[in-house]
Image (tube, rainbow, N blue to C red):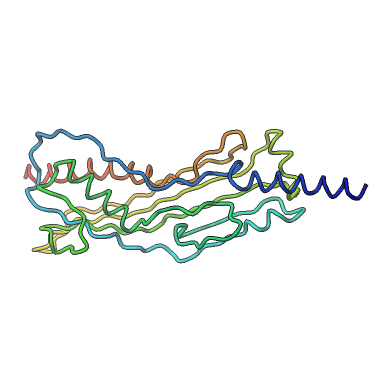
Amino acid sequence: MVYTKSLEIKILVSIFFFFLSGCAFPTPRSWQYSIDSYPTNRQPLLSKRVAVPPFRDSRPDKNENATSLEGLVLVPFGWVDFSTPEALTDKPFRIFPLWQFRPTEYFAKAAAEELDASNLFKEAFFSYRASEGDIVLRGDIKSTRYRGKIITYGLSMGAIVPWMLGLPQGTIHNELEVEFTLVDQLTGALLWNKSYTLSYHKSPFWIYNIPSDFDYDNLFKAIMRDVVKSLESTLSGRNGK
């Protein structure tokens, strides 16, 4: 009888950690960005070279990980609240995955590629030296906040049962806040400035349909589409004066 009970516990623990290892939680996804298609015969609205240096990182240095609470009986859920999710170190047992994500560099390179393809300027390029351009586009990352929750209903390992019965398993939230400034290198004049805040929510999600918990590339893509439109409007207005 004792052996049977011990075997049941081992089986339950094995199933629980099988799900935690990746079957029942969001899978890792790295940064993926592709530029839009633009008319190739469009003449630049501003015949100057734009340098895009690595973005400034103004995010708070605060990462809270309380996922261990989900293993406690009577505790309804475990959670994470990361300001800099890519900076976390790996652990032997980790629910939420590490990402290959360097926002200060990746955002700047994506912005440079998008602007260069848009033909709004003579040229746009990523550079560690802003002085290489006639004008400079700077980005300031205010937030890449990540919040996630795993709901265990106070059952610890027994949470597998309500999950399989169709109860929600958790929540996911990405937030991206970035500010852009376009400055003339020679005169120091501010040519354009705009801030953006976008969010991605998957709340709740279920064990049978687990979404990605990384959407920062898509959020930044949506931002850059508006950046191009806003710059086009601003530059067209300047040329019309």
Which of the 4 image quarters holds residue 22?
Answer: top right
Q: Nearer the viewer, residue 196 or 121?
A: 121
Which of the 4 image quarters holds residue 166?
Answer: top right
Q: Residue at x 27, y 60 (%)?
A: 54
Is 92 displayed left or right of 117 in the figure? right
Q: Residue at x 72, y 38 (%)?
A: 162
Q: Position of residue 106 (x, y in %)?
A: 32, 53
Image height check: is 102 above or below 159? below
Is 113 displayed left or right of 86 in the figure? left
User: Considering the image in quadrants, where does the C terminus appear?
Assistant: top left
Q: Position of residue 17 (x, y in %)?
A: 67, 48
Image height check: is 95 above or below 57? above
Residue most extreme to the front: 3
Is 158 displayed left or right of 210 in the figure? right
Q: Position of residue 45 (x, y in %)?
A: 10, 43
Q: Nearer the viewer, residue 90 or 220?
A: 90
Q: Nearer the viewer, residue 147 or 179?
A: 147
Residue most extreme to the right: 1
Q: Residue at x 46, y 66 (%)?
A: 61
Which of the 4 image quarters holds residue 132?
Answer: bottom left
